[in-house]
Amino acid sequence: MNISLRKGEKIYMNGAIFRVDRKVCIELLNDVTFLLENHVMPLDEAKTPMKQLYFVVQTMLIAPNDTVAAVDLCAKLLSSLQSAAGDQRLVEGLARVAKHIDERRLFEALKIVRSLFPIESELLGSPSAVAQELNA
């Protein structure tokens, strides 16, 4: 697998963080867990339940040798979200997330959580939808 990075970009691999000082192409020759900088959510953006779940799973991926607290928090978040989710799309998505986490396929879990953001936004009522209702 080849990964292209621009100058100053970061990549998180197996618990290590790399920042490149020039444009590079990295060829990964074996199985490695990685996360590109543009997929990393800063803590201050984790303001909704689904984004908080994303942040916790991301933490487990970025720091694989220090996941005890994150795994516990992830299990609690998943349990809360699954019991509160009234929308079938969320229920099914969260079940898939839980399965991937159990299998330690964290990147796959992140992709599914990211795909649930629009559903969560729809259910919580996006700011633009609220503004449209107020103007009507």
Image (spheres, helix red, strand yellow):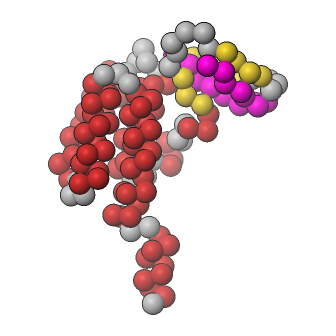
Q: Quadrant of the N terminus?
A: top right
Residue sitting at the far right: 22
Residue 123, image x and y in percent? 33, 63
Residue 51 in view in this figure? no
Residue sitting at the far left: 83
Question: How many numbered callouts?
Answer: 0
Span colored in magenta: 1-14
Q: Quadrant of the C terminus?
A: bottom left
In the rendered view, tell whether residue 54 sits above or below residue 14: below
Near-viewer residue (5 or 55): 5
Please report the residue visible at 70 percent of the width from the left and 24 percent of the height from the top: 19
In the rendered view, tell whether residue 30 sits above or below residue 101: above
Residue 134, image x and y in percent? 44, 85
Residue 48 in view in this figure? yes
Residue 75, image x and y in percent? 25, 33
Please report the residue visible at 35 percent of the width from the left and 50 percent of the height from the top: 49
Residue 126: name its quadrant.
bottom left
Residue 113: name its quadrant.
top left
